[in-house]
Image (cartoon, rainbow, N blue to C red):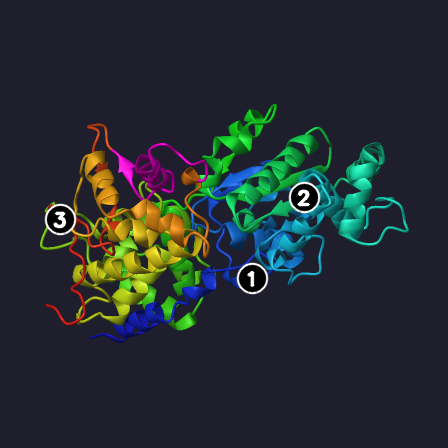
Amino acid sequence: MSDAVLVLRRALTEINVTELGWKAADTPDPGQIFTPVDHDGALDPDRAVVVGNRGVGKSFWSAVLSHPQTRQAIHTAYPRLGLDRTEIRLGFHEQAASGFDAGPAPSVASFDSLAAEGMDPFDLWRGALLAALREAGAPEQGPADLDGRDALARWAARDPLGVETALRRADGWFADRGRKFVLLFDALDRLGKSWDQIRPRTEAALRLALHLRASRALRVKLFLRSDQFADPTLFAFPDASKLRQESVSLVWRRRDLYGLLFQRLWSGPAAREALLAVAGPDAPASWQRSADLPFYLASDEVLQAFLFYRICGEYMGAGPSKGRTYSWLHDHLSDAAGETSPRSFLAALTRAATNAQGDSRVLTYKDLQTGVQHASATRLDQLKEDYGWIRTALEALDGLQVPSLPDEFIGRWRDRNTVGMILKEAGSWLSPLSLADDPADPESRLLEELVNINVLERRSNGKINMPDIFRVAARIKRKGGLRPPPLPGRR
């Protein structure tokens, strides 16, 4: 076994997957930020609504955008966005929800308290905006004797014309300086203990985003879960369609994921030298002279595939009939929308390297299969953080073979009273959003919910399929598919 194989294998096992689980108030290390070309729209201050499922980086990008040093660090990658001339403050985020943040973002307790006074959530958001503008240095944001977000919110409720005057002044103040101001929202599913609380508070934030579209320099930006974006009640107010039409999905394409992988490896001198040794004389000469990840290795799939084949071979078996490793790994980690989270991708490779047994390659195709099995279990654990009911829904499907007709899913849930169990447990987590309105056919709505969050996919023949990233850990069968790992104590 060569030294390069050992060094790369060790470097893969040492990739810190947990560091991808950022909260918006955390401060990322600028040296660890990877900037996919395709994330330009998601980071644009003028794109109000960004949609993404669990693990795609909503909170990570919120953290990057809300801290001046990291915002400046990504400016060179996205110069069109003018992030070097943009002030960004968090209007809501996970730490604020519990009251562990002293900034302008309200806590859930603040919402509950002011709601008891009869305050419209829209006014509380305007109070948070005024407080954030004060923090950013904008003058005359409400009467000088009013101290704090809640006091400004009460003023907004009783003097809407005064608020409009203050916001016009702030808009002119930033515009005259060639700058923008963004109030950024993350973790909006933490806005309350039930959807009855979360929905109107989220809708109010969307209304504020729409209201500020007419300004020159003031903006609101919201990172939304995919099930929230699919909720029609959030976009039932006048002109809300404008926000929906201009929304952007936060997606990691295959080239972005491999770019992230190679950036992590390239950042270590020993691993970089090992990569060059594995690549051999066919690698571009420019790679030898680059301390930073070469641009084309971050975005060119032909070069990425070339290097990945040197790491683990080209095929998932003896020949091309089993698929090529570069595409196979991404495909088997993708959800129903064809999207793969960076945490799942790196987790699969880290586990593959931990269990690697071969001598001539860093990884083998069998190691990749083991990595996908591990990533599937990890992905379900991640989803449970947002969708606490998902294990109950999937446990009833144990042993089912997909693709299957919808009635086979619905029948299992009815036989096991799955919806009843989910609603009974909903005190410790949010119920599926589609069940919040007391539907007449709850099992069908549960099926639709799993489609909305990309755990299930509808096929053109009417059958329902489940991608391997969820199917394997859920122990659901598919003919010819990757098998679930054996249960403890079994072979």
- For label 1, the residue is 28
- For label 2, the residue is 182
Are the residues tagged 3 and 2 within 8 Å (C-beta)?
no
Identify which amino acid the numbered label 1 is placed on: Pro
Based on the picture, tell me whether residue 456 belongs to the magenta stretch: yes
What is the distance, in whole Å, between disc 3 and disc 1 at their CAs? 39 Å
Residue 437: name its quadrant.
top left
| In this view, 31 is above or below 220 | below
Task: Please tell me which of labels 3 and 2 falls first in the chain.
Answer: 2
Secondary element at tag 3 = helix
Q: Which mark is residue 322?
A: 3
Residue at the spot x=27%, y=68% of the render?
A: 353
Identify which amino acid the numbered label 3 is placed on: Lys
What is the distance, in whole Å, between disc 1 and disc 2 at their CAs? 19 Å
Residue 483: name its quadrant.
bottom left
| In this view, 272 is above or below 197 | below
- The percent position of residue 201, horizontal first and vertical second, equals 61, 41
- The percent position of residue 69, horizontal first and vertical second, equals 64, 58
- For disc 2, the neighbor class at 10 Å (few under 14, some 14 to 19, many from 20) is many
Left or right of 243 in this view: 133: right
Q: Which residues are magenta?
A: 436-458
Q: Which mark lies nearer to you, 3 or 2?
A: 2
What is the distance, in whole Å, between disc 3 and disc 2 at their CAs? 49 Å
- The percent position of residue 81, horizontal first and vertical second, equals 61, 41
Left or right of 452 in this view: 330: left
- For disc 3, the neighbor class at 10 Å (few under 14, some 14 to 19, many from 20) is few
- The percent position of residue 5, horizontal first and vertical second, equals 26, 71
Identify which amino acid the numbered label 2 is placed on: Val
Secondary element at tag 1 = loop
Secondary element at tag 2 = strand
Based on the picture, tell me whether residue 289 belongs to the magenta stretch: no
Visible in this render: residue 136?
no
